[in-house]
Amino acid sequence: MPEKLHPNVEKVAAVLREHGATGEIVVFEEATPTAATAAARLGCEVGAIANSLVFDADGEPLLVLTSGAHRVDTALVARTVGAAKVRRASPDFVRAATGQVIGGVAPVGHPAPLRTLVDTWLDRYETVWAAAGHPHTVFPTSFAELLRLTGGVAAEVEEKATAG
């Protein structure tokens, strides 16, 4: 790891240590802005990538940690959290809520805790990988650890294919 990490990565590392997480942050030479690029670099299935997606749920930030193999069903998520409307957040909304940029949003290390849903699909993998606060960083974790670290709720969040 480089001697000096980005301040967001330092903050994520501190939260991970504080909560007893043992996974070491991995720093890549190049950004891994998508689940596919991260999976290719790590040599794992795209489904084992935990995308940290921020949504605007009736004006409040909602973090959805979803498998890289899924697209989030915003109507399902809205019903799950009791919101009238859930939509993808703008880059400015994401940065205000997390202090991090899209492509590097970590599950933790935000200015304040975020209401969080954790995709139940991630429980299929012994190890899942999440961004560590910067587009060049990830860390290994697990479904159970993500729930513990974030205080999140396990939920189905993926869009289902429709016949017809």
Image (tube, grey):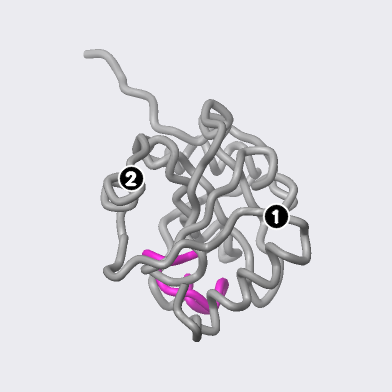
Tell me the magenta residue range.
Answer: 93-105
Q: Amino acid at mark 1?
A: Ala
14 left or right, relative to 29: right
In the image, residue 161 above or below residue 92:
above
99 left or right, relative to 71: right
Name the residue carrying label 1: 21
- In the rendered structure, does residue 143 fall within the stretch colored magenta? no
In primary-sequence order, the first of circles 2 and 1 is: 1
Which mark identifies residue 39?
Answer: 2
In the image, residue 142 above or below residue 18:
above
Which mark identifies residue 81?
Answer: none
Q: CA distance from mark 2 to mark 1?
A: 21 Å
The image quarter in which residue 58 lies: bottom right
For image coordinates 31% across by 60% down, the residue present is: 32
Dot 1, how many residues are within 10 Å of its Cα: few (below 14), some (14-19), or many (20+)?
Answer: some
For image coordinates 58% across by 63% down, the residue present is: 61
Q: Amino acid at mark 2?
A: Ala
For image coordinates 54% across by 84% down, the residue present is: 7
42 left or right, relative to 140: left
Screen quadrant of the C terminus: top left
The image quarter in which residue 117 lies: top right
Residue found at the far left of this picture? 164
SS at mark 2 in the image: helix
In the image, residue 5 above or below residue 117:
below
Please state which of residues 137 and 81 is positioned toward the viewer in this rendering.
137
Residue 109, percent across and down? 63, 70
Residue 37, percent across and down? 27, 52
